[in-house]
Image: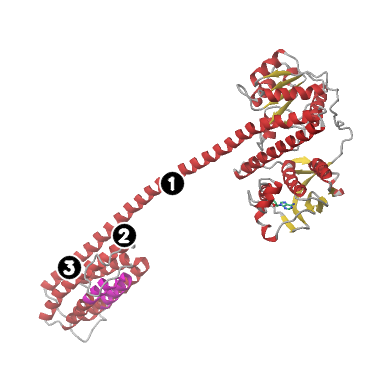
Amino acid sequence: MNKKVRFFNLSLDKILSKDLSILDNARLRLLYYGLALAFFTLFVILADVLYQRHIILSITTGIMFLASAVLFKFLTYKPRWMLIAHLILIVATIVNIIDIFIAIQNVDVVTVEVIIMIMLFGFYMLGQKAGLIYSLLNVVPVLTLALLQYSNNYVPPFKPEKVDETTTIIAIAACFILIAFIHSHFYKAFIKTITQLKETSDKQSGLTAEFESAMEKAQKSSEAKSDFLSTMSHEIRTPLNAVIGMSNLLITGNPRPDQKENLEVLKFSAGNLLSIVNDVLDFNKIESGKLVFENIKFNMVELMQNICGGQMMTARTKGLLFKLDVDSILSRKVLFGDPTRITQIVFNLVSNALKFTADGNIWVKATCIEDRHNRVTVNFLVKDTGIGIEKDRLDIIFEPFIQESLSTTRQYGGTGLGLAIVKRLLELQGLKIKVNSQPGVGSEFSFNMEFPVSTEVFEPSDNQPQHATENDETLSAIRMLIAEDNPVNVMLMKKLLSKWSIVPSIAENGERAVELVQYGNFDIILMDLQMPVMNGFDAAKEIRKMADHQKSSIPIIALTASALFDIRERVQESGMNDYVSKPFKPNELFEKIKMLVAKSSTGKFKFSDTLVIPQ
Ligand code: ADP
């Protein structure tokens, strides 16, 4: 009710407001017309009772007449309907009691009508509680009077005033009009409220539908973005893998020193580009909420050695001292967790330490800080003596695409996604990363992670295949099928395999691979996953369905350039034995081939637990 109403206002429109509910506006209207009607009716009745010289009735009617005038004015100046309703009910109750006990000393039709009116007015205007109170205040005196009269106990010292018929008729008519008016008014407001409610609910359903369709659109566009990035990943990574693979081959082919230097630059830049693409893709996967954590068995010492193996070499070439300390308590334990994610986290931290340290040392530690019967808590720490980070940048470096300063970008490159990925991966497991750093002195990143412990004891296998050398020819008798559509990759694979004296057969798509398996004999299949006509997953499924057991059980290694997080499950689901991510390390591929062929000849295939560590 923000409207400014002048004192002399008599208009109803000025006191109604859009800010009020339909019911409250109906209350104002009822008061306005009700008081106006009461004013005129009471004026007539007052004139009549005065004419007939009924003193008490003249006083009570006079009070009501004046009250209706004053309250009407009050209403049109300050529309405080609740206060006005209370005042009306108080005055009406007092007058009613005076009338029945003193003025007419009886309960006639008009009294009954007045009481009904008070009851209706009380309930409609002020609600259930107030309505009940005013009803009782009026009904109880009537019943009391009836009881007193019944037992002849009511003998007042003065005579009742006899109201003539004209006054009675006017009063009866006025009361009827008011009762009908109150009802009709509230019925109208009630219907209006229901219609408005329906309209609101219709509008809400419309909005909900709109919201749902917007959500669907957003979801679709996010899926499209995700799919686009996955496709892009394949498209970018495939040629990049070829570049890296070719530079690897050329470097090992005795180039001139100046050529070797150029090739190293080429290999380094392609590797860098690949890690940027991988970072963007990983971040996209995490942000799209599609990441599912694995819970598989692994040994911490083995895992940490795998993660840091390559990094140690880099440290050595940079002249840095690299120390890896894994708590000896963990060496025989088999833990449950997600080694891929731990690799991703630790690898990112160690890569940064290497990147931002020019001299001094790098220290990677995994300490068991709590060893309860079937759970351990491990503290991971990556410490360096590098350039350090300014205090006010310590929080911001975990934001995506943020680096400590512009000069960092210029000097060290990178996307600024590494730490964002680390932070998100830990947050998704309810964990936090801590950082301590001092510019010019070094940095220290650490976090704690809890792992369930298996009852098994870890046995480091001494009889693991020895690292293959480029000249190893133990695989020369292997009949290999490669399903790969990209001619550059085919050439690359052929060159690599020729070093192991393997001459592979080539299928340019999944369907052709299935055909070749049907008509030929192979010991192992290397299966690219994204191929035209039939993809690698479907081709593997077809092969596994073959009636000839020897063919349906040929070991299959998936070759993937995809950054899909669920690649392991999908490869396993389609019946393949293992996978390698492109660009693969020749030694790793060699070992996998060797292991699977050996297993297949003893008839014991199993999905290998060895994971390829992304480079
Ligand atoms: P990127 O390494 O691609 O720049 P990150 O998210 O991994 O992105 O790191 C963000 C920034 O944090 C880096 O650019 C660097 O300024 C700072 N930073 C991270 N690790 C270290 C470290 N070990 N020493 C010094 N600065 C670091």
Decide which of 386, 522 is in the foreground and name it. 386
Q: State the quadrant of the N terminus.
A: bottom left
Q: CA distance from mark 1 to mark 2?
A: 25 Å
> Mark 2 highlights which residue?
22
Circles 2, 3 touching at the beta carbon (< 8 Å): no
N-term-proximal mark, 3 vs 1? 3
**What is the span of residues highlighted in magenta in the rendered image?**
69-94
Q: Looking at the image, is 50 positioned above or below residue 253? A: below
Q: Which mark is residue 119?
A: none
Mark 2: which secondary structure?
helix
Label 2 packing within 10 angstroms: few (<14), some (14-19), many (20+)? some
Mark 3: which secondary structure?
helix
- 520 sits to left or right of 206: right
Decide which of 485, 185 is in the foreground and name it. 485
Q: State the quadrant of the C terminus.
A: top right
Decide which of 250, 560 is in the foreground and name it. 250
Q: Position of residue 549 (x, y in %)?
A: 74, 18
Q: Quadrant of residue 313?
A: top right
N-term-proximal mark, 1 vs 2? 2
Q: Quadrant of residue 272?
A: top right
Amino acid at circle 1: Thr
Label 1 packing within 10 angstroms: few (<14), some (14-19), many (20+)? few
- 608 sits to left or right of 467: left
Label 3 packing within 10 angstroms: few (<14), some (14-19), many (20+)? many
> Mark 1 highlights which residue?
208
Secondary structure mainly formed by the magenta segment: helix
Number of the front mark, 1 or 2: 1
N-term-proximal mark, 2 vs 3? 2
